[in-house]
Image (cartoon, rainbow, N blue to C red):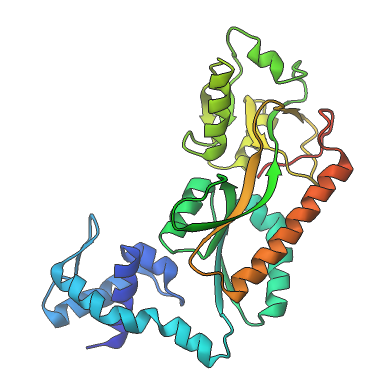
Amino acid sequence: MNVHHLELFFYVAKHGGIMPAVRNIPYGIQQPAVSAQVGQLEEFLGVTLFQRRPFALTAAGEKLFAFITPFFSNLDQVAGELQGGQERHFRLGASTIVLRDHLPQLLSGVKKKFPGVKVSLREGYAARLGELLAKDEVDLVITLVDRKPPAGFQLQVLVELPMILLVPKASKLKSAEELWQRDKINEPLICLPAHEMLTRMFQAKLAELETEWFPTIEASSTDLIETYVAGGLGIGLSVAVPGKNLPENVKMLPLKEFPPVLIGALWRGKTTPLLGTFLDMARQRAAEITKTRAVSGQERPESRHAAVI
């Protein structure tokens, strides 16, 4: 029996399919190769190990997975012990702007303390990142969070940021409150999909204000929201983050009565030395952001220093 074929099957069974396995195998291998080699294992054994669509292990697959799991699941631990306890792989998920504007500094610090560590980055918004974490496809995510983490997750709140509306600079609106006073809001609302936390929090508060304003454009990222507002396509829902200027033709309107959005780190299982080091640096970075906001006076409605996450 080919041990490499068993390893590939282990990843397929653990992550619930061939494509999720490809994303988590710690070396480069493509989907066709995994399919072919797992197929060879099934041919050798003379059994079907799993159903492809929807994914489900057969009785034979369950038996084989139970047998090989103790060996393959402990390989990283043994390797770490043999390497002197140094972790070698850190998988992180976050939004585009977090990855672009904050991660380089954090990862530089991590690599100084853990030389040779391999870092994998996954991009996405809150719901998608939560799925990746639940499937064990990432070790930690930085995203919008609730104050109470889901069962089985650990949470470190990093910063609280205010909700804002982004409007074209030429707009006559001087405050968001002007919108709530209307019988009907005609401007298109640009926001993340309805299941995203930011959108849900916004709609919940609108309901308290007895105001109806439903999305016209659902963007896949907050970067797109800013772009669409700059293009004059409507009013965008976002979050103010210090240190960046909006485009010249965009201004922000604070949402004073709306709750702040929490940005935090979520992870599962024990806090390893590498993960703990990253969290310490993330807290320091968050403290710097908070200090920047206080110094720059971003609480003032007229301030233009904001970016979206």
Quadrant in which the N terminus appears: bottom left
Q: Residue 32: in sight, yes or no?
A: no
Identify the residue at the far right of this view: 295
Q: As displayed, is residue 228 above or below residue 295?
A: above
Write down the quadrant of residue 180 in the picture. Answer: top right
Figure label count? 0
Quarter of the rendering containing residue 279: bottom right
Question: Which residue: 35% across, 68% down?
Answer: 31
Residue at the outermost bottom position: 82
Of 30 and 203, the residue lying toward us: 203
Residue at 61% across / 75% down in the picture? 273
Q: Residue 90 location in percent, x, y?
A: 56, 71
Residue 271, above or below 227: below
Residue 83 horizontal side relative to residue 284, left or right: left
Determine the residue located farthest toward the left in the rendered image. 46
Q: Is residue 9 visible?
A: yes
Q: Position of residue 48 (x, y in %)?
A: 15, 70
Query: Left or right: 110 with respect to 207?
Result: right
Q: Position of residue 20 (x, y in %)?
A: 38, 63
Q: Nearer the viewer, residue 248 or 64?
A: 64
Q: Is residue 295 above or below residue 272?
A: above
The percent position of residue 71, horizontal first and vertical second, equals 34, 84
- In which quarter of the view is residue 199 placed? top right
Q: Residue at horizontal 72%, vertical 78%?
A: 112
Q: Residue at x 71, y 58 (%)?
A: 102
The quadrant in which the C terminus is found is: top right
